[in-house]
Amino acid sequence: QVQLVESGGGLVQAGDSLRLSCTASGRTFSTNKMGWFRQAPGKERESVAAIWFSVDTTYYADSVKGRFTISRDNAKNTVYLQMNSLRPEDTAVYYCAAGPAGRFASSPWYKRENFDSWGQGTQVTVSS
């Protein structure tokens, strides 16, 4: 039961950078991981990056590894996504998500089903 507020989306040109922010409020004591997902037209929502709040563990999709960086500020209950060298194929609605520690033996911890709170989404458009 966490409320998420996102900011930072916009329209940029290929090669530009963008930084997304997401702040959690509510029952944040139960929030142990946060992540970024994206969904482009005609495609399923996919994991982009995720991070644990308690340990130094992160996940990056192969398509963004080396270009995107996820970071967190535990005191502010905030997660960031720094996106560099943006490409047109990065165009999508980006969603912030949060979830408890829980158990994730049935699927990787960064998968969609392991998150239970979602932001409203922010549009990122990259022109060629």
Image (cartoon, rainbow, N blue to C red):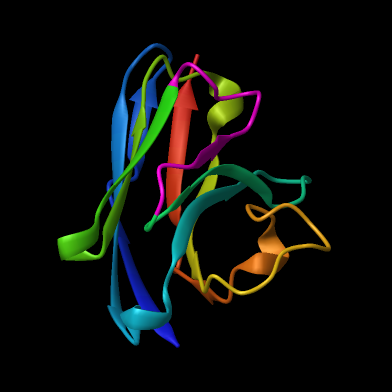
In the displayed structure, 60 sits above or below 23; it is: above
Closest to the observer, 106 or 66: 106
| x, y percent for residue 128 | 50, 13
| x, y percent for residue 102 | 61, 74
Closest to the observer, 126 or 79: 79
| x, y percent for residue 72 | 29, 49
Q: Is residue 87 left or right of residue 81?
A: right
Image quadrant where one finds the N terminus: bottom left
Q: Quadrant of residue 85?
A: top left
Closest to the observer, 87 or 25: 25
Q: Can you see residue 77?
A: yes
Q: Tell me which residue sits at (37%, 57%) in the image.
A: 53
Q: Tell me which residue sits at (72%, 64%) in the image.
A: 104
**Main secondary structure found in the magenta portion:** loop
In the displayed structure, 123 sits above or below 62; it is: below
Q: Tell me which residue sits at (44%, 68%) in the image.
A: 119
Q: Is residue 65 left or right of residue 63?
A: left
Closest to the observer, 32 or 93: 32
Extreme residue in the right direction: 106
Does the magenta run of residues contain 83?
Answer: no
Number of disc labels: 0
| x, y percent for residue 18 | 30, 31
Does the magenta run of residues contain 64?
Answer: yes
Q: Can you see residue 121?
A: no
Extreme residue in the left direction: 75
Q: Tell me which residue sits at (44%, 40%) in the image.
A: 124
In the image, which residues are magenta? 55-67
